[in-house]
Image (cartoon, rainbow, N blue to C red):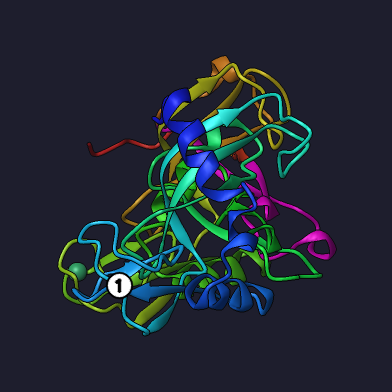
């Protein structure tokens, strides 16, 4: 994590008004593109991409080329420091992070604010993208801040999605909107993966077959949580790995309609769906899983 002293150095790099004072061709191009909601970097003689662009390669001191390339707009947080009490001249009036962000396609990092909501949401490797101002005038502040890519999905589930392409997640969420669980079936391994995915994590094959699996399943492992969660009915609540009937991989979900101390491995559960009219393209369509009352299942492993 960046220390305070390092932070104040990087802070000076970005907001001193130096951009307006030295609007040479390189910086000028960068700011002009910002006004049009694009971020560009400049190529160095050895083909690295500097973002923000500089007129001279800081490594070699050589002038940069005249080649500009569009980068991002999404990127990855390299380092960050949390600002709990923003000052008057800060870009946000609520707690935020100053972060070094490596935009996709760039070889250097850009300093900017990340509106992550909470310090716990920040981590190296966090994917972020810019939130543009509606009215842009050709300043670095045309980007109001960066925001994390996905914020509304409970994090253990999100961790699974980062290894699946967006198309697979979208398809899975379409199913969830319609009240069904879509799985991917690998013909090579004969395994059924939930959530739906388009490549097999075991053999790497492309998954062509989509399957609908049951909304009933068995709790394989679970955790009792004592910290409040906006989606949970009460504290303590239970989150569990649930092996849906017909699936070979478990999915993470909340367990409800049962006291936390009664939840057990092997317990049979069924998804409790939001009313159809309230559903969106989101995991929150599933309120939680509730006991079916069937006898416990035998767990193989
Ligand atoms: Zn496979």
Q: How many labels does the image show?
A: 1
At which x and y percent is residue 250?
38, 48
Q: Is residue 232 magenta?
A: no
Where on the picture, by quarter, is residue 123? Answer: top left
Q: Compared to 115, does 227 lie above or below?
A: above
At which x and y percent is residue 53?
43, 67
Can you say which quadrant of the picture contains the N terminus? Answer: top left
The answer to whether residue 252 shows anywhere in this view is no
Q: Does 53 sit left or right of 30 as displayed?
A: left
Residue at image point 67% right, 23% down: 228
Residue most extreme to the right? 277
Ligand 1 position by quadrant = bottom left
Can you say which quadrant of the picture contains the C terminus? Answer: top left
Residues drawn in magenta: 266-288
Q: Is mark 1 within 8 Å of ligand 1?
A: no
Residue at image point 78% right, 37% down: 93
Q: Does 251 sit left or right of 56 as displayed?
A: right
At which x and y percent is residue 116?
61, 42
Where on the picture, by quarter, is residue 76? Answer: bottom left
According to the picture, the residue beneath numbered tag 1 turns out to be 63
Residue at image point 64% right, 75% down: 37
Residue at image point 33% right, 66% down: 56
Q: Is residue 287 magenta?
A: yes
Q: Is mark 1 on a helix, strand or loop?
A: loop
Residue in the foreground of this view, choosing between 78 and 66: 66
Q: Compared to 254, does 195 lie above or below?
A: below
Residue in the foreground of this view, choosing between 294 and 29: 29
Where on the picture, by quarter, is residue 232? Answer: top right
Q: Dot 1, crowdedness within 10 Å: few (<14), some or many (≥20)?
A: some
The answer to whether residue 66 shows anywhere in this view is yes
Residue in the foreground of this view, choosing between 84 and 136: 136
């Amino acid at each position: 994590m960046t220390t305070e002293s390092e932070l104040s150095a990087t802070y000076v790099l970005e907001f001193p008004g130096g951009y307006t004072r030295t609007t040479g061709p390189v910086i000028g191009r960068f700011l002009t593109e910002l006004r049009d909601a694009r971020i560009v970097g400049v190529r160095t003689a050895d083909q690295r991409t500097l973002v923000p662009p500089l007129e001279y390669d800081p490594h070699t001191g050589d002038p940069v080329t005249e080649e500009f390339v569009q980068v991002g707009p999404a990127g990855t947080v390299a380092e960050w420091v949390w600002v709990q009490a923003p000052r008057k001249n800060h870009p946000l009036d609520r707690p935020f992070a100053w972060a070094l962000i490596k935009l996709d396609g760039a070889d250097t990092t850009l300093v900017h604010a990340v509106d992550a909501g909470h310090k716990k949401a920040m981590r190296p490797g966090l994917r972020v993208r810019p939130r543009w101002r509606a009215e842009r005038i050709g300043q670095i502040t045309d980007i109001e801040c960066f925001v994390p890519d996905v914020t509304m999905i409970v994090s253990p589930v999100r961790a699974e999605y980062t290894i699946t392409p967006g198309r697979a997640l979208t398809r899975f969420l379409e199913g969830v909107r319609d009240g069904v669980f879509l799985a991917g079936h690998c013909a090579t391994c004969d395994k059924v993966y939930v959530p739906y995915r388009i490549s097999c994590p075991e053999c790497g094959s492309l998954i062509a077959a989509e399957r609908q699996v049951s909304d009933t399943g068995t709790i394989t492992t679970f955790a009792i949580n004592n910290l409040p969660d906006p989606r949970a009915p009460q504290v303590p609540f239970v989150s569990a790995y649930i092996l849906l009937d017909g699936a070979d991989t478990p999915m993470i979900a909340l367990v409800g309609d049962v006291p936390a101390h009664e939840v057990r491995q092997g317990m049979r559960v069924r998804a409790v769906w939001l009313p159809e009219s309230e559903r969106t393209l989101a995991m929150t369509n599933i309120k939680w899983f509730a006991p079916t009352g069937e006898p416990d299942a035998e767990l193989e492993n």
